[in-house]
Image: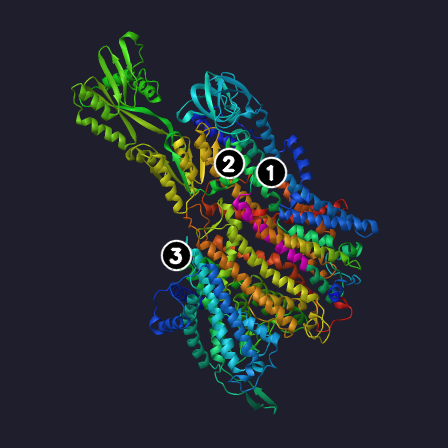
Amino acid sequence: MPTISTAPETASRIQQDDPRSLLPKKLVRARPFFDPEIVRRATQASLAKLNPITLLKNPVMFVVEAGAALTTIFLIRDMLTGGSAIGFQVQIALWLWFTVLFANFAEAMAEARGKAQAETLRKTKTDSIAKIVLPGGKLENVPASKLRAGDIVHCEAGDTIPGDGDVIEGIATVDESVITGESAPVIRESGGDRSAVTGGTRVLSDCIRIRITSNPGETFLDRMIALVEGAERQKTPNEVALNILIAGLTLIFLLAVVTLQPYVAFSVTQAGSGSVPTVAVLVSLLVCLIPTTIGGLLSAIGIAGMDRVMQHNVLAMSGKAVEASGDVNTLLLDKTGTITLGNRQAVEFLPVAGVADGELADAAQLSSLADETPEGRSVVVLAKEKHGLRGREIADHEVKFIPFSAYTRMSGVDLNGRQLRKGATEAVSKFVGELGGVAPPQLTEIADRISRQGGTPLAVADGPRILGVIHLKDVVKGGMKERIGQLRAMGIRSVMITGDNPLTAAAIAAEAGVDDFLAQATPKDKLEYIKREQAEGRLVAMTGDGTNDAPALAQADVGLAMNTGTMAAKEAGNLVDLDSNPTKLIEVVAIGKQLLITRGALTTFSIANDVAKYFAIIPAMFAATYPALGVLNIMGLHTPQSAVLAAVIFNALIIIALVPLALRGVKYRPQGAAALLRRNLLLWGVGGILVPFPGIWAIDQVLALFHLA
Amino acid sequence: MTALGILQIVICFALIFACTKPLGAYMARVFEGQRTFLHPVVRWLEVLTYKVSGIHEEVEQRWTQYTASLLSFSIFGFLLVYFLQRMQGFLPFNPQHFGAAQVSPDLAFNTATSFLTNTNWQAYSGESTLSYFVQMAALTVQNFVSAAAGMAVAVAVVRGFARHQMKTIGNFWVDMTRASVYVLLPIAIVAALFLSSQGVIQNLKPYTEVTTMEGARQTIAQGPVASQEAIKELGTNGGGFFNANSAHPFENPTPVTNLFEMWLLLVIPAAFTYTFGRMIGDARQGWAIFAAFLIMSLAGVLVCYGFEQAGNPILANLGVQTAATPTQAGGNMEGKEVRFGIANSTLWANITTDTSTGAVNSMHDSFLPIAGLVPLLNMMTDIVIFGGVGAGLYGILIYAIVAVFIAGLMVGRTPEYLGKKLEQKEVKMAMLAIIVTSASILVFTAISSQIHFPKKGYWNPPGAAVANINNSGPHGLSEILYAYASSTGNNGSAFAGINVNTPWYNLTLGLAQLIGRFLFLIPILAVAGSLAAKKKVPVTSGTFPTHGPLFVGLLIGTVIIIAVLTYFPAVSLGPIVEHYLMHSGKLFSTILLPHGIWS
Amino acid sequence: MSRWVASFCWRAGPSRRPATNFEDIARTTEPAALCELGEDSMDYIITGIAALGLFIYLVYALLRPEKF
């Protein structure tokens, strides 16, 4: 079963299926996990993060730091006054500080990766000179940073576009590789859905006039840098809720450990032997019990989740959008470009009665020779394959090409007095009628049949004679059906949106295996559909690129805007795909789920770990008071000191050991919730109970070997 | 363990299982205001209650109003019980002429909070402290209404899950009236009649003076016992008419009444799981909770019974026969009634601490360490194994929220339970409820294990708070821990072995009862209000399934892990160490040896 | 209050012979290493105050998580 892996490699494989995004160059290259430069910076940052004021934001780690500080103060006092067990206390204090440092390191690693990416972006943001168009039409050079929204600038070949804006005049090829990593230039022209330009990109040919739409510091590039850096990062709702749980558990354990002191004092009096554990030991117990693993890694998981989305060349405007994508119930997929290849292809010639196959094919090919659309080319190719008809060179003076127009809804050629036309059935029938011919009833019959199969009928006429119909078919992308099936297994309904008539839509929907479709959809229909789904409690995700998609993009819980789209669409969506590949939505959903699973897994693991730590610390703590409790020392740890130390060391090391996992996310296979839960509970719950036993035992062995405790 | 013992345990749970669906379905109809077969008989009483008290049956309340109604009702109940006790000398049905001297202000406070909160912790002996009038008008009435209030809250919480995009969660007064009129009263009346037919006494006579066969004079206490006994069990109250509680032959004369009383105290908490499933429109969800209850309860019973039947190894080492034979029970019979035996005593001990009843038919203090640890742990779970009437259901739902919140993320969606997204407010309130109860148990025990008072002073005449305990060594810590766990959990069973009728204990235990009831219940009502206002998320194959064995396992795991992680250090210094010391041949006397245990 | 504090001022008794697998170790290592409570019960009072501060801080973190 193919899996939706969120690894970047898979993303590029999928992109290759899609002709619109060949050469998937990454804006953000997957770096090696422990890139030395990043590690160096993260190490520095983790020391800076020891500042208690900064740490106040992370309750669990603040408690650990307070414990470490307290232990250190008592240690220094004991060193000065010549107290006992200095070696043990030194080690405990050191490892408590390491615990905080490791958690800081995890967060710093995640941030450093983002910062490195931001720097790459910032390098492209040199302050260029803009040619501002003055009211009189004269040009004046001003620094780009002085541009305000509403200014009009002039750019020609070689110029860097000084700010975000809309083309209001002209057409040009633009190199947008700065933003998208895509080296192929794109066309930007005034009007329509291709008018948006982004500051920092470069005009390659021609010249355009642009109306600037953003003020300095608020451009798309600025926002992108801020997002990548994590400067704008806010805690997502689920993260806040998880923080409540973690703070609550920390409170419970604080109570359990603090009240332990009087219990032991009571027991010591009763038993007449032993003594109350030192502050260092009580702090150790507390730090081992509170959920330091998840507390230390939680923010790193969130930052890394955003980072993973970025590695797919998708820009998330907030962490909330990524989190919400894991929750999506309904996915609205545009038919064209997402489900189908985006262009229809001729698959069959269907002549009406009395017309030979060859004649129809010949006429169809002739009428399409000048037709440069993919549909037109596919007709030429089909005629060649099926009937051995080669494309012919036709001398210019003999022919007149009739291009397609929205008014006539036909195209064709006038050739040696023949008027060859192909086009919509009604349009061609009307054309034939005007020339005195009559469309045979069979035509409607064939056309309907093709429509029912999800195809598009193109009638072909030679003057007043209808020859037959070309069957144009939408080709569903390879592997689409499997992916839709995976979405269904994940509990996500996929809905196909298309402008086609219901008959065509139903046929393609059946072929692609989607759960529902919305035919002859207008932007308003889309918006209504989303609102209806949301009213029933569902979360909706969609993609869009046009300005008329903007309301629906804004309404959807997850709106993935295409980078090729208009600025309005990009503003409305909460995710922007720099590759403009609508299939990405599926990857984004998988990343969202992976993010949530990683959080849940580490929380469960963190709590489950406590069981083993009790078995290490409790018998050690009470060894002097109630040696009988030594029975609980099932790991056979060497000494009470080594037992406590081993538990503390394990607790610290597990944080650093799980950093790669927190940054990468746990493995995710699209499957039903029940199966997923069973697997993860076994792995992280049961595993979390078992793993620390050998871990603590091994550390204890090492400690004993080096006579450290 | 004997085959006969196991059989008796199985019969008890089988009877409960048989009644869960019919009673649960009936209660669902009652609380949804639908017509039931009892409407012709008691509907007039319901209508009359509304008329007299000016309640509008159709008007619903928001969670804040619901909570305010509950609190005002509780405050009124508290004042009534307090003053009825203090003024019992001026009130009728008082053949023994008890007065204010028998009930000091602190004792009256403790008893009032105790019956108000459905705890029924008894720092007094009924037969030597309270008049028949106080027993009937104050305590028995509270037995009904505190149970009905618990049921009302549970129903409100269930509505929180069942409803969507609504601001209200029902009407407290209506829910409470219906719980009393349609559920508690009819069953209690039938049960009282049955109990009195089996030998439970019901009279208002003065105590009987008799001369025993040895020629000694003995006073035999009398009273309206059957009527209180029925609701004591049915409402999971547990406050015995007599000090000996259900070990007393006038309260629980035969094995048949014993089985019947166990059935009474489990039946409503069990049936509530089905009511829950029915009201949210998916019976499987209710059965999942029932399964979790049953498995946790059975596990406790088997561990407890196993250790008690195995007996004390020290006695066995002395050559005492501790195995069961046809002529003797074997095991540890200390503190148990011969007519009940080990199986029925340990089964009762578990059921009474699983539910918030606290009635006892044996001395829990005499249980072997691990057998005594089981009832203690049952209470440390915040009483969510069947639990009190209503209280058990809303308690387990809090744990379900925590379980789903932690593990639910692992299906790759933000957590949702029964179609409701669990967000900041739910998690906050669930954690608050759990924290407050553990804080109450841990902190009060810690203080009591250390605090000193002047000898013969007002607060605690014996001096230090630990001077009230009977046993030295770890068992002493268990006794204090048990008292606060029992009070906070609103259970009310006593480990005994500790003198708690002093101002210090009366006040702190009373406070623990109030905390355990209201600071647990208010967050839950807040959750109900928040859930009711939410949209319902449709169920898909990507939804965390909460009706299968996996969820049952997860729920049990969460309850056990939270209890164990919170209390393991404390219990390891109590029952656990005691167990290992016993196995190494060490016992504790009531007198401290000069060199402790090691001499 | 003085009695309350006094209860913390319990002085460690002589360590007795333990009876478990920690037995040998407990004999050879210094018992005071883990469990040390002499006159300096000030340690516990300071720790107790710190714990109280943390308790208040955590309650705040629980009730007002959006501030974190």
The question of residue B509 being in magenta is answered with no
Inspect this view and state whether residue A87 appears.
Answer: yes
Q: Which span is picked out in magenta?
A: A235-259
**Quadrant placement of the N terminus of chain B:** bottom right
Q: Position of residue B73 (x, y in %)?
A: 49, 69
Q: Position of residue B182 (x, y in %)?
A: 40, 70
Q: Looking at the image, which residue sits at the far front?
A: A136
Tell which subunit mark 2 falls on: A
Image check: A91 left or right of B355?
right
Where residue A660 is drawn, which disc sits there?
1
Crowd tier of the residue under label 3, counting other residues whose Cα lies within 10 Å: few below 14, some 14–19, many 20 or above: few
Gap in Å between the C-alphas at discs 3 and 2? 39 Å
Label 3 vs label 2, nearer the camera: 2
In this view of the protein, which residue sits in the foreground, A600 or A212? A212
Work out whether disc 2 and disc 1 sit on a shared chain. yes
**Quadrant placement of the C terminus of chain B:** bottom right
What SS does tag 1 mark? helix
Residue assigned mark 3: B281
Q: Which quarter of the picture shows residue B448?
A: bottom right
Picture residue at 58% right of the left edge, 36% below the top? A230
Image check: B366 left or right of A560?
right
In this view of the protein, which residue sits in the foreground, A275 or A368? A368
Crowd tier of the residue under label 1, counting other residues whose Cα lies within 10 Å: few below 14, some 14–19, many 20 or above: some
Q: Mostly what secondary structure, the magenta segment?
A: helix
In this view of the protein, which residue sits in the foreground, B320 or A690? A690
Where residue A317 is drawn, which disc sits there?
2
The question of residue A245 being in magenta is answered with yes
Residue type (three-letter) at the residue carrying disc 1: Pro
User: What number of labels is visible?
Assistant: 3
Residue type (three-letter) at the residue carrying disc 3: Gly
Label 3 vs label 1, nearer the camera: 3
